[in-house]
Amino acid sequence: MPSIIVLLAGLVFSSVAFAQTARPQPSGAPNGQTAPVPRRDLSGIWDAQGAGVHPLGFSHLRPAFTPLGEKMFRANKPGRGITEVPVGLTNDPLDSCDPGGFPRANLFELRAVQIVQTSNQVLILYEYQRVWRVIWTDGRDLPKDPDPNLYGYSVGKWVDDTTFVVQTVGMDDRTWLDNSGDPHSSGLRVEERFHRVDQNTLQLTVTIDDPAVYTKPWTAGDPVALKLQPPNREIKEMFCVPTEMEEYKRLMANPAAGKDDQ
């Protein structure tokens, strides 16, 4: 029973189990004055507190599918959205505890992240699924024909003192964009804009560009505001555990969908 309780908490990705109270770092400005915005600096621990979990995914925001995109979308069987099926009948990769990949890392269960800047890279460490991304900042170009992988290949640059723009290509087309089963091809290109609004707020905007699947580029929902955390904030483990997922399916998801346990 304790194992099942832990499992259910993991399956719904409850913020109760993992989130901590978000407290911005003191601005350091005397007498209530506004602290200056740090220049070309994203470093720190930031919390979006589960942003990106839209109740209907992004199906109501994206443009029309191409014929290929429509076919891909109909082949996906999500647990929510306009084509949702009972949880025991979904083919969502996350239902098997496969990696969510990118850009789903930003569009689903975006919680605490730690951003680390080095001389030639920006590293993003995610709480959910305990994964990290490398963004190259040494001026290199994106690869012309990248080998697809789950989190893509990223390069970034500062376009002004408070805005860092990242371009990512080379995503594995087995991953989904969101909980509604919105698909993408291996030709997907994603743009992230990280804008340092003030000392304690980082705004993230994600734009999807995939001509094979969508009729035009589109922005995935509203910009997400991430809040700066104290430097001693600990980023928790937040995993999908395959053995516990299988037990959940056997005891709950499959019976609810009318499937016999074999």
Image: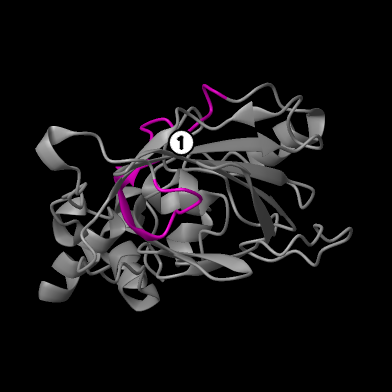
Q: Does the magenta stretch include residue 57?
A: yes
The amino acid on which the numbered mark 1 sits, given as a three-letter code, is Glu
Across and down, in percent, residue 97 comes to 45, 67
Please give the name of the residue rendered at 10% of the width and 74% of the height, measured from the top-left corner. Answer: 2
Please give the name of the residue rendered at 58% of the width and 49% of the height, measured from the top-left corner. Answer: 176
Quadrant where the C terminus is found in the figure: bottom left
Q: How many labels does the image show?
A: 1
Q: Which residue lies furthest to the front in this view?
A: 30
Above or below residue 138? Residue 55 is: above
Q: Is residue 61 left or right of residue 212?
A: left
Quadrant where the N terminus is found in the figure: bottom left
Across and down, in percent, residue 257 comes to 37, 48
Across and down, in percent, residue 164 comes to 57, 46
Please give the name of the residue rendered at 27% of the width and 67% of the height, measured from the top-left corner. Answer: 235
Q: Which residue lies furthest to the bottom in this view?
A: 243
Please give the name of the residue rendered at 69% of the width and 59% of the height, measured from the top-left corner. Answer: 172
Which residue is more in the foreground, 102 or 38? 38
Q: Does the magenta stretch include residue 223?
A: no
Indicate the quadrant where residue 67 lies.
top right
Using a 10 Å C-alpha cutoff, classify the residue at mark 1 as few (fewer than 14 neighbours), some (14 to 19) or many (20 or more). some
Indicate the quadrant where residue 150 lies.
bottom right
Which residue is more in the foreground, 59 or 153? 153
Above or below residue 216? Residue 177 is: below
Residue 82 seen: yes
To which residue does mark 1 refer?
Answer: 84
Magenta residues, dominant SS class: loop
Residue 1 seen: no
Q: Is residue 169 left or right of residue 116?
A: right
Highlighted magenta segment, given as a residue range: 38-61
Across and down, in percent, residue 203 comes to 42, 38
